[in-house]
Structures are given as structure tokens and as C-alpha cells.
Amino acid sequence: MKFDPFSLYFLIEQEGQVVTLNHQTVDTTYDPATATTSGGTETPIKVKGYFYSYKLEEIDGTNITKGDRKLLLPVTDTTGAVLPEPVNDDTITGVGDAVSVKSVDKIYSGTDVVCYICQVRE
């Protein structure tokens, strides 16, 4: 499927809602003796995103489960700053609930990333 970047921007701008991406940094430390992690920070970032559902035939019960949704995010936050690439276990709050990022796909125009499609789960 070919994506038109301008259509994606329009969809996000016209139909999207402001949410908070709670982005995890990777400076955590794992202690095998206690099986715990420590350190790291969570940075809240306001971004306008568009949620939509998976098609029934995409739900396999393993990788994509009932209730999973897709979240379309632009590459900039609400201030126009570059959005860090979402990573697994980042959380998204707003729109009445909180979801966790399970996977991220990038949409390119040429060599530039124009948006992220995140699989999210409650």
C-alpha cells in the first residue's frame, strides 16, 4: 500500500487528538542478582495522534490481539520539535485511557521518516 504523506498529515491534523507519549530512555541497568531494573527516565511529550482499529483479519491472537489498536504519530510533537522514535513499552495517555506501545513501524517518503504507526495495547 502506498502512503501519501500529505494525506497522513491531514488525517492526523483533522482527526487526531492530543495525547502524551511517555517516552522511556534506554539508560536503565539490569541487576541479574535481584532480577530488577533501575535508572532510566520517562519523558512526557505532547503529540497529536490518530487511533484506529485493526481489521478483523489482521488479528491473529498472538502478535495482534483483540483490543489492540494502531496509533499514527507524526515525526514532530505539538511544539514542532522532533519526536523521538517511540519504543516498546512507551505509554500513551489521554483520550480516556492509557496504552502501551508493542511495536513501531516507520512510514517513509524517500529516505525521510514521515510518521510512525504504533501497535498499542491496553
Image (cartoon, rainbow, N blue to C red):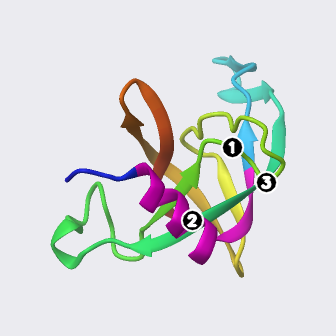
Q: Earlier in the sequence, mark 2 or mark 3?
A: 2
Residue at the far left: name it: 57
Residue 66 falls left or right of residue 101: left
Image location of residue 34, percent across then percent down: 71, 25
Identified by mark 3, the residue type is Thr
Tell whether position 19 is magenta: yes
Count neighbours of disc 3 (C-alpha within 10 A) and say few if under 14, some if 14 to 19, many if 20 or more.
some
Magenta range is 5-21
Residue 110 falls left or right of residue 58: right
Q: Which secondary structure lies at badge 3?
A: loop
Q: Residue at x 36, y 28 (%)?
A: 110
Q: Is residue 118 visible?
A: no
Label placed on residue 12: 2
Q: Is 103 located above or below residue 91 in the figure?
A: above
Query: Which residue is more in the foreground, 97 or 116?
Result: 116
Q: Which secondary structure lies at badge 2?
A: helix
Label placed on residue 76: 1
Q: Is 77 located above or below residue 53 in the figure?
A: above
Dot 3 corresponds to which residue? 78
Label placed on residue 107: none
